[in-house]
Structure formats: structure tokens, C-alpha cells
Amino acid sequence: MNESAKSHHTGKPANTESSYSVKRADLPLSCPTPDMVLWNSHPRVYLPIEKTGRAKCPYCGAQFELED
């Protein structure tokens, strides 16, 4: 990746973990999350976590748990 491209991709890599904890302040929940780099990831999908406190991404299988 050239230096110009690197400057446009800041944040943590997307889909590198299988389990994530999120807070109510992070809602609405999407995978990848807004602070993840998207260039090598699946399309962003919004996940309903409010009712059960848990959600699973249909693309990558990442598990999300609401901390509050």
C-alpha cells in the first residue's frame, strides 16, 4: 500500500476478533464498527442488539455483547 493510501485507512483492522463488547453509547451497532478500517472488510450491516444484549454478524460471524 502506498503512503497516500495508508493515510486514508486509519483505525483498527476490521473483523480481526470473534467477540466484541459494546456500550449503549456505541449504538446503533454495525459490523464493521465505525472505528474499523473498511477497505478489506464486508459491507457494513447494522445489528439489532438492544432487545437481547447480543448480536451476531451474518457476514463474518463476529459476536457482540452489550455491556450495560
Image (spheres, grey):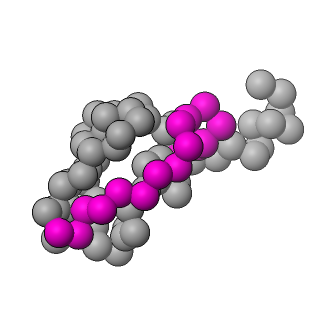
Is 9 placed left or right of 37 in the picture?
A: right
Q: In which quarter of the image is residue 17?
A: top left
Residue 40 in the magenta stretch? The answer is yes
Query: Is 53 placed above or below 21 here?
Result: below
Q: How many marks?
A: 0
Q: Quadrant of residue 51?
A: bottom left
Where is residue 43? Give x, y as percent.
56, 43
Where is residue 40? Give x, y as percent.
60, 31
Is 64 placed left or right of 10 in the picture?
A: left
- Report the residue that reaches farthest toward the bottom: 25
Nearest the eye: 30 or 36: 30
Q: What residue lies at 31% left-to-right and 34% top-to-bottom?
A: 61
> Does any portion of residue 40 appear in the rendered image?
yes
Nearest the eye: 9 or 45: 45
Query: Is 61 placed above or below 7 here?
Result: above
Q: What residue lies at 37% left-to-right and 70% top-to-bottom?
A: 27
Q: What residue lies at 24% left-to-right and 52% top-to-bottom?
A: 55
The span picked out in magenta is: 36-51
Is 33 placed left or right of 7 in the picture?
A: left
Query: Is 67 placed above or below 54 here?
Result: below
Q: Give the main secondary structure, helix, strand or loop, of the magenta stretch.
A: loop
Q: What residue lies at 38% left-to-right and 33% top-to-bottom?
A: 60
Is 39 placed left or right of 49 in the picture?
A: right
Query: Is 53 placed above or below 31 here?
Result: below
Where is residue 59? Give x, y as percent.
41, 36
Q: Quadrant of the C terminus?
A: bottom left
> Does any portion of residue 67 appear in the rendered image?
no
Q: In which quarter of the image is residue 39?
A: top right
Where is residue 1? Give x, y as percent.
77, 25
Residue 66 in the magenta stretch? The answer is no
